[in-house]
Amino acid sequence: MSEPTVEVHLSPEQLHLSLREDARIGLAATPKWLPPKWFYDARGSELFEEITRLPEYFPTRTERELLRASATHVAEATSAQILVELGSGSSDKTRLLLAALTAHGTLERYVPQDVSEAALVSATRQLADEFPELTVHGIVSDFTDTLHNLPRGGRRMIAFLGGTLGNLVPEEREEFLASIAEVLDEGEQLLLGVGLVTDPAVLVPAYDDAAGVTARFNLNLLSVLNEQLGADFDVSKFRHVALWDAAHEWIEMRLEATTAMTVRLPVLGTKVRFAEGEQMRTEISAKFRPEGICKELERAGFGSDRVWTDPQERFALVLADRVG
């Protein structure tokens, strides 16, 4: 068994500077916003793992069952030698793909990517123990700025699971999918996991659960700003909001100020004013229709899409080939 390796392209200092820049721009905007990648400090990651086990939160377990049912078909269709996963996290669901591809006899290398070096080091060690026949090579980076670091030298498949594509607005998705197409050779594949448009009565509670775990997850973002940027947000004076935007077909998560206040951010040398009832967007989670995501992939340079959905059509796995 070869020892797992982790290649760092995003230092803690760079991560801190990126947070500062996002806070500087997003908190000065109208309306205010912050990108969801800052949810995932140690506490936020723990809360998200708790969310995935909630009865209301169907995406994770639905995607896992889809992978369980389709992983062998994916392995046969791709014969991938290198599996690259963007935003890998704990690589929990990905183990189903790894098992299918190693059983198929083609997979040689797994390349998980994540922003957290500590999480990636832990995950790569576990995976190297579980799959001793594989070379495991982690990359610490931001998935939107890492594609040029991807390995070559074998038939590759990029996996982007968990519905994370939906966190990007349409213009960002277009640019991101095109950039993936640029680094893949003809015949290599992209495997996407995307949430589908479904009944808002089912969808909204997945982002606003009865136990309040998602609320704590959302509010933790303010604690991240307090800890990392020396801000003085009073977390108790904000509330979690989740709503369905039917026009854009996405869920929005927001934080709403329950009273007027001024927040100091000494690291940025600025103050931010919130009116009572003012909302700050912290995440969008776009949902797709199968024909719509296939068209987006086609515009980016992909074709021959194979789509697997659950019986209730709430989630989809899409396998797309890079075309010339």
Image: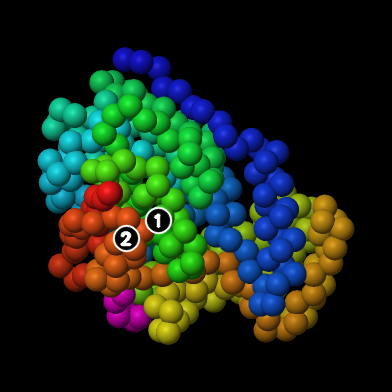
- Could you tell me residue 248's position as x and y percent? 43, 79
Measured in 3D between alpha carbons, the distance from the residue under mark 2 to the one under mark 1, in whole angstroms, is: 7 Å
Q: Secondary structure beneath disc 1?
A: helix
- Could you tell me residue 194's position as x and y percent? 32, 61
Residue denoted by label 1:
177
Q: Is residue 97 magenta?
A: no
Say whether marks 2 and 1 touch (CB < 8 Å). yes
Q: Residue at x 51, y 28 (%)?
A: 7
Residue denoted by label 2:
297
Q: Secondary structure beneath disc 2?
A: helix
Tell me the quarter of the picture where residue 111 sits: top left
Q: Nearer the viewer, residue 212 or 100?
A: 100
Give the magenta-colored segment's residue range. 195-202
Amino acid at pointer 1? Leu
Amino acid at pointer 2? Leu
Q: Earlier in the sequence, mark 2 or mark 1?
A: 1
User: Dot 2 surroundings within 10 Å: few (below 14), some, or many (20 or more)?
Assistant: many
**Is residue 219 found left or right of 60 in the rendered image?**
right
